Amino acid sequence: MKGKTANASARHARLLASAALGLAALPSCAAAQEAPAATPAPSADLPADQPAGAERTEEQAIIVTGSRLANSSFNAPTPVTTLGTERLQKMGSTNIGEALATLPSFRASSSPSNSTVGSNISPVNAGARIADLRGLGQSRTLVLVDSRRFAPSTSTGTVDLNLIPTLLIERADIVTGGASAAYGSDAVSGVINIILNKHLEGVRSNFEYGVTDRGDGNNYVAQIAAGTSFADGRGHAVFGAEYDKDLGVGGCYTRTNCSNEVGNLTQTAGVNGRPANNIAYNVHTATLTPGGLITGVVNAAGTRSAARGGPLGGLQFDANGNPVPFSYGQNAGALFMEGGTGAGLNSFFGDPALSIPVTRYNAFGHFEYEASPAFTGFIDMSYGHVAGYTSGPEVRDGGFPGNGSLIRIDNPFLPNAIKQTMQANGITGLVIGKLGTDFGQMNSVSKRDTFRIVTGANGKLGGTWAWDGYVQYGVTDYTQSTVNDRITANYAKAIDAVADPVTGKPICRVALTDPNTACRPLDILGQGQFSPEAKAYAFGTTYQHTRFSQWAGAGNVHGTLFEGWAGPMTLATGVEARRDQLSITVDPISAANGFYVYNATPTRGHVNVIEGYVEAGLPLLKDSPLGRSLDLNGAIRRTHYNTANLTVSNSFNATTWKIGGTYAPIDGVLLRVTESQDIRAPNTAELFTTPVTGVGALSDTKTGSQVFATIYTGGNINLHPEKARTFTTGITLQPGGALRGLRLSADYYKISIRDAIATLGAQVIVNTCNTTGAADICGLVTRNSSGILQSVSVLYLNLNRQDLKGLDFEASYHTNLGADSSLDLRGLATHTIKLTNSAVLMPGTTTPVNRAGDNGLNGVPSWVVDGFASLTLRRLTLNLQGHFISGGKYDASLIGPEDPGYSVNLVNSININRVPSRFYTNIGASFDLIKNGPRTLQVYGNVTNLFDVMPPPLWNGNNNSVYYDVIGRRYRVGVRYNF
């Protein structure tokens, strides 16, 4: 078998080499560049005479984004937004992912401080910065580096933007529309093309320190980049590296805005005149406490019933294990209540860190040499390391009507007074709700090490034709471990204690029949009442190692077919191939789903892809009475996929295309339109990861309660590609004369995805099943014989349809104010009109829930606006940024008093369904102490969230940090030295 694997790898390497270099033998090929594309309009981050999405030097070809064509006069029909390196510096951004998250077209779905409520306790991809363009999902945003795919670097097969050295970034081009015909699978919502400065001369360095207004969140950054040319400029070498250590910010209780402990209390709709969902303050846990709460009783027949209202109701155990009163608050449910015992102890608020500690470092090297105009060879090597550290949750056993922990009457740790009451009332067991703070939190670490090497060449072939090709290998080793994770079977045995018939000392019940058992009795009544041996038996460490590897290669040719009446008819064509492999190994207990949370199961699989494309550009008008220019652009790509794991293999074909055009009726006005069919094939994580278990707090409208349920997550080998139809149209205005330097643009976009590969969130699955009864959704939900929610399966599926439409606006202005002085203004806005998933319907209707204007965890705000102003006065630069998030709904699937048709009797009713808007202000300044040619010394400082604006207090835990700043005012100071 090992020999066969080696032979297969060798064959695949030969295939990739052929794809990359085989086209070099053709007599006419593509322009002298690594990855051609079209030229969008100027951006405020670039000089006014240089187009956004284009890098141009005297000896270099143009590298542009959005097309494969090499004609510098070609106008791209697809809108492109550019984020230049100058903007990164002025914002004080330590990496490109942080800067991209401020753009209105992005949903900041994953970062050290931006995650869904409560997920900062999870070690999965902890600390990663993963882009989500349009809010359609991270896997639908294709990330390129110098127009080439970057190796997958997270456990979900996406790209962690932490791995790219910031000082080497020239700019980032964002194609805000489908681009699969140009770049292949995954470019459904768009493309991020990060262009590196591969002709850097000299040395750049940056050293920075950051801290929050509360004195936490310490952040240390060091960056360096260097480059030089040799052999009379025919060769060039570039190197960059950076180190970033962020100490993180603690849980929500570290911020005063969390003292109100806001949460959503659910109940049966209409009871006591209250809706099904109630945003309430002072929310405490109603069925679990640190010392243990008696929530249920068991009779001789084994039947469970609520303890509240009975002889043992309202009793908890103090730290020493003694029974003491427990005060129920108002509207107590199966998990939470309003008021009562437990102020400041709600672990759902305290556990998720507002920003987790992250340590990262990376390095990148580039070497190129021009042997002749026909051949320039290059090699890139990069390495990146990211480690994220999370804490929590501790054991959370919600009591009755949940499963809780069963303590029998013969348990020697029960106080005698409790035993006597049980005997007098025919009670044989107690259901205990335990918040295991005394066991300690689960400390987790996830580490990602990504290595990538690319080698290739490009050159001219004569006339306008040129070629390029490359071969790439990348591998990511992902390790994840959690200490102090409860071993489910051992814990159940350990808490089921009895008295030894001989010694009278506590032993595990299982020891009565298995004297050699390693089980040691665990006392959960009180806090810290157990022995170290019992704790060691009941808790352990999870371990997972995941390896992603990718071989990729491509070969392209491009040039001019003929000169037409309005300009050259250009053509680009090429072939590409890649192989993605996934393997996961885990510890034996995890493999059996034996831990409380963060189990993983072993798996292995691969995806093979081979594809070819053709793209053409045809100018129809130039300086005509009918207009200044009219250009047409079209492309088609055919792709073959083969997927296989250890037992199943599938194959399928896909075709993508685009057609578009631009029209300039007069100088300074450009109209554009594009329609495309795009695809996204399932990635290795979606295909091959096998179901694993975790737990989650869910609101169940069917029973009007909140419970802890088991959540299964995993992949699906039977997935097939999703297809998207994308339409964009827009206008760009760029006047001259007195208004030179002004640029305005507006674009409309519409994306419809069929057979969308996605998971519905566990809460969405429960809500949809309860309100629609859809068999395919309800099949993912299980309940016990009493109707209590037990588990939810969150698996990847080809879900019916997703639809998105909206508007993008951009305005920029640049003007010189004299020697070394200038003013730059830029504004970006996105208005989302529609975001629907046909699997999620409004109750009692066939109408999908429109998540546009939903400011909750599953939606996108109606308006997001970002404005930036920069004033440079010789050595001094002042910067001002404003970021606006419009008000919206708490949850678009719910109906509140502000919505038509509201009634407290509706199963999806809520007492408040509006979220106020937020406006954040950031300022910065820099001063050049030395400014002598290439030698500069600059000091700078930035204040983020100047007015310390906190998020709307409507979500528990970390208050929906997907959109809102949950940390508060932060300071950054640093020094840049270049020579």
Image (cartoon, rainbow, N blue to C red):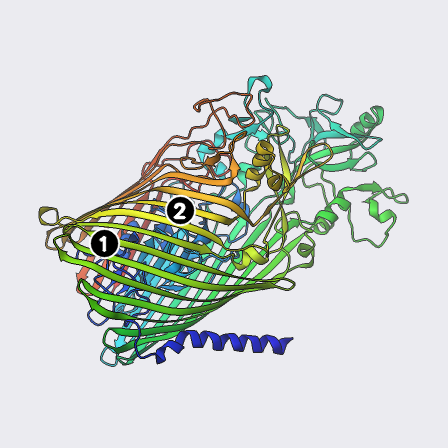
Query: Residue at image x 48%, y 31%?
Result: 259
Q: Amino acid at mark 1?
A: Ala
Please tell me the numbered disc located at residue 130.
none
Q: Regarding mark 1 in the picture, which secondary structure is present there? A: loop
Q: Regarding mark 2 in the picture, which secondary structure is present there? A: strand
Q: Quadrant of residue 603?
A: bottom right
Q: Which residue is mark 1?
A: 41
Residue 697 visible in the current orientation: yes
Q: In the figure, 525 relative to 86: above or below?
A: above
Query: Gap between marks 2 and 1, in whole Å?
Result: 23 Å
Task: List x then y, in percent, for residue 11.
Answer: 53, 77
Q: In the figure, 961 relative to 480: above or below?
A: above
> Residue farthest to the right?
502
Task: List x then y, in percent, for residue 767.
Answer: 57, 34
Task: List x then y, in percent, for residue 323.
Answer: 72, 29
Query: Residue at image x 75%, y 28%?
Result: 305
